[in-house]
């Protein structure tokens, strides 16, 4: 995705995208998604996520996931984190989380939010959060690790379903301190 020059152009592009997405025309929708690879912008993540959460079309769904998994634009991280905290995207959280490690986006600035999501989520979401922690390019600070490890240890006592994954996250974080 490259940056669109002005806010007016960006707003117009988002409006056009939303109209195409609302048309339920598979061919036009897929074409519009593919054009975003060349002239997209991180602000256009939200319409993509709206489409991903609403579509029942497998081709459209897989095209959106493919684009998200190939973003490679660090500015896309913030809107993705915001979406993870929005209940309307609960059904696609696994796909949003996969975007971080598939696209090699740096989630380290969002460690606390990733850990909090892991603590309050189901097995698959927690597994994706662990994968993100395992894929950090840089190590968190020792202070960050101690802080989130305390939260994780408390959660292990309250969540037997995800106990092993949360313990794995503690181990992975501790490896950053050691290594």
Image (cartoon, helix red, strand yellow):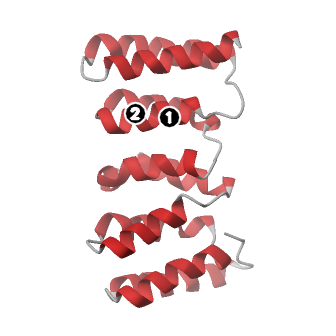
> Residue 137: where, in percent of width, then height?
70, 34
View extreme (right): residue: 5
Work out whether residue 161 can be spotted.
yes
Q: Which residue is mark 1?
A: 131
Around disc 2, counting alpha carbons within 10 Å, would you say few (fewer than 14), some (14 to 19), or many (20 or more)?
many
Quadrant holding the C terminus: top right
Q: Quadrant of residue 124?
A: top left
Q: Which residue is mark 2?
A: 127
Residue plotted at (43% across, 81% down): 18
Quadrant holding the N terminus: bottom right
Count of marks, rendered view: 2
Residue 28, above or below 128: below
Question: In front here: 159 or 78?
Answer: 159
> Residue 150: where, in percent of width, then height?
47, 11
Q: Is residue 92 left or right of residue 107?
A: left
Contact (CB < 8 A) between labels 2 and 1?
Answer: yes
Q: What kind of element bears circle 1?
A: helix
Q: Is residue 46 left or right of residue 156?
A: right
Residue plotted at (38% across, 32% down): 126
Residue 65, above or below 56: above
Q: What kind of element bears circle 2?
A: helix
> Residue 171: where, in percent of width, then height?
52, 14
Residue plotted at (72% across, 79% down): 6
């Amino acid at each position: 995705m490259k940056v669109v020059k002005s806010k007016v152009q960006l707003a117009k592009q988002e409006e056009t995208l939303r109209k195409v997405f609302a048309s339920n025309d598979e061919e036009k929708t897929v074409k519009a998604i593919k054009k975003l690879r060349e002239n997209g912008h991180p602000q256009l993540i939200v319409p993509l996520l709206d489409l991903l959460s609403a579509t029942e079309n497998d081709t459209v769904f897989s095209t959106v996931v493919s684009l998200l998994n190939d973003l490679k634009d660090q500015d896309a991280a913030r809107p993705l984190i915001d979406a993870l905290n929005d209940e309307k995207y609960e059904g696609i959280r696994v796909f949003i989380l996969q975007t971080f490690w598939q696209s090699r986006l740096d989630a380290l600035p969002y460690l606390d939010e990733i850990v909090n999501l892991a603590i309050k989520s189901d097995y698959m979401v927690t597994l994706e959060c662990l994968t993100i922690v395992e894929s950090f390019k840089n190590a968190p600070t020792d202070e960050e690790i101690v802080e989130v490890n305390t939260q994780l240890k408390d959660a292990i006592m309250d969540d037997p379903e995800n106990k092993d994954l949360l313990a794995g996250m503690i181990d992975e974080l501790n490896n950053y301190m050691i290594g």
